[in-house]
Amino acid sequence: MNDQIKILFVDDEPNVLKSLQRLFQEETYKVVTATSGQEGIEILQREQGFQVIVSDYRMPGMDGVEFLKYAHERWPHTIRIVLSGYADTASIVAAINEGQIYKFVPKPWDDDDLRMTINKALEVFFLREKNEKLADELMDANAELTTLNSNLEEEVRIRTSALEFQCHALQFNRNVMDILPVGVLGMELDGLIVLNNILSEQLFCKKNDSILGLSYREALPAELAALVEQTMATGESRTTLTIFEKKYSIRGVKFTRNVDQKGIILVVIPE
């Protein structure tokens, strides 16, 4: 325990209060006394930070249970204990819930028992205080987690929307390419074919086969493969080629979009 611990004893008999002060004089507690319930309320209003309140039951004016009931309403975190003679036991038990009283201690009390009761009351106080602090921290953590989850959900929604748009745009681009009246072939600088449209498939793909992923050398006619190599060397090339007894004008262009995108585009235009 530490010197911040404060205990209030309320009893209308000064000798009882002196006995209680002597009992706890070797403790590090700050012991405060009051001779009536009204005085006890004034002390609680004037001084903050009492952990335990011990009150006699039978006092003139405001009795102990009435005083502790008021203390519970105003200072609910305090631990409240009733002191009284055996003759009052039945009425004390009936009134305990009114003041949310922690324990009833009969008069005359046993010093060791009373010390132990006070120590246990303090343990309960600090345990409740710790639990409330942990509960507040948990609520804060849950609130923070809820915010993070909400932000994450929004981020996922935004990214999903962006991906859906990109997929839609890619499909639109593909559809546009497929309806073009020209054939389009795209390949990386190592010669791997990575792009074609419907017309180029009709011109260069065998039935049920695909040229995607193939080298231009194995997928294209020799004359067209030579055009690809010329484009790689000079950056641009043109030729005319007859495919399936139809003449096509073919243009090759080397492009560099950025560091990661370099390649060759062939455009096959029916004449």
Image (cartoon, rainbow, N blue to C red):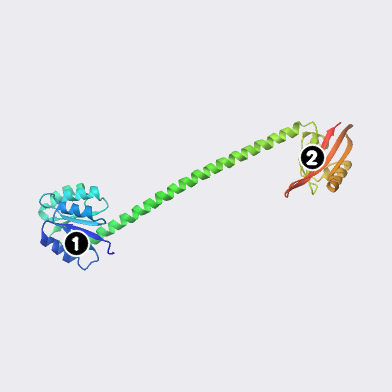
- The image position of residue 222, as x and y in percent, is 88, 43
- Quarter of the rendering occupied by the C terminus: top right
The image shows residue 94, relative to residue 177, as above or below, that is below
- Helix or strand or loop: what does disc 2 sit on? strand
Residue that mark 2 sits on? 185
- Quarter of the rendering occupied by the N terminus: bottom left
Residue, x 17% and y 50% (percent of image)? 67
Residue that mark 1 sits on? 114
Q: Do the residues labelled 2 and 1 touch (CB within 8 Å)?
A: no
The image shows residue 25, relative to residue 141, as above or below, that is below
Residue, x 14% and y 57% (percent of image)? 106
- The image position of residue 126, as x and y in percent, is 30, 58
Q: Answer with the quarter of the image where residue 86 lies.
A: bottom left
Residue, x 17% and y 59% (percent of image)? 33
Badge 1 amino acid: Leu
Which numbered mark, 2 or 1, is in the foreground of this view?
2
**Foreground residue among 50 and 161:** 50
